[in-house]
Image (cartoon, rainbow, N blue to C red):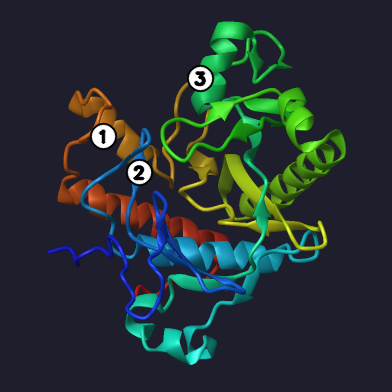
Amino acid sequence: MLAAPLDATDLPGLPPPRRGKVRDVYDLGDSLLLVATDRISAFDVVLTPGVPGKGIVLTQLSTFWFRLFSDVVPNHLLETEVSRFPAPLRAHADVLRGRAVLGRKCRVVPFECVARGYLAGSGWKDYRRTGSVCGVPLPAGLRESERLPEPIFTPATKAEEGHDENVPFERMASEVGAELATRLRDLTLGLYSRAAAHAAERGILIADTKFEFGLGPGGEVVWIDEALTPDSSRFWPAASWAPGGSPPSYDKQFVRDWLEASGWDKRPPAPALPDDVVSGTLARYREAYEVLTGRPVTLV
């Protein structure tokens, strides 16, 4: 019998949260409380049931990457240990432990910064149609899941609801300014390359990933939201990868594949996830965490 997932939080004494697809965000005035629930989404629909403990895996893995690459760019983390949260928050320790952090408030850059090292997902579909990915021309004859000659940057607009939209770099530069767009492109590719090298040493390929950034009060770039998780990345076991098809993964592709096979038309509501899909998803997320960090995760 699976444990009950944490589908949402409602913390007495705090303002109502802003609910995203996965996170509940509480505005504390001078900082934010970010709580990763166990909600899971696919095809822009929040699914039921959630995946018990998923939010803990996401929070702990993000914290690992933020700390590992703190020399590259500042991140939003202020505190990750609930025992050191302000007293009113410690009263909710049973809910928050392992899945919540205190973060800096930033002005969010309204683009997702995507790095792609392999040809998969929407990039593969775009390439088959145009020979390019988000306007970036690629050599002819590449196969699905093939490694690209070099990683590419493909920004996307951030949508509160519905689909994010892949856009050319020039669109991003026109909206946020060429200097900032170039800085974020370079940061994205630099973080991706370092993370991919770390993962490859442990037998995982990071096919692609998305980052989000904000601007601090002095205009400094801050890495925010989440970092290199199975929700925001494609993780492939290196031993199972081969170009020409879709390899097994440690990410949400397992859920997407089940939904595609179910005959669902991708309009809400989605069919309920069976227990074996829920448990299989959690197992993949946990394995990704443990392989990448070298330590077990405790689902408190």
Displayed quadrant of residue 19: bottom left
Name which residue lies at 64% across and 75% down: 78
Quarter of the picture holding the C terminus: bottom left
Q: Earlier in the sequence, mark 1 or mark 2?
A: 2
The residue at which mark 1 appears reads as 258
Q: Is residue 268 visible?
A: yes
The percent coordinates of residue 43 (x first, y second) are: 36, 33
Q: Earlier in the sequence, mark 1 or mark 3?
A: 3
Q: Is residue 144 visible?
A: no
Nearer to us of marks 1 and 3 is 1
Label 1 SS: helix
Is 38 located above or below residue 188 in the figure?
A: below
Q: Which mark is residue 26?
A: none
The residue at which mark 2 appears reads as 41
Q: CA distance from mark 2 to mark 3?
A: 27 Å
Residue at the extreme left of the image, as rendered: 1
Tell me the kind of residue under disc 3. Answer: Gly
Tell me the kind of residue under disc 1. Answer: Trp
Quarter of the picture holding the N terminus: bottom left
Tell me the kind of residue under disc 2. Answer: Ser
The residue at which mark 3 appears reads as 244
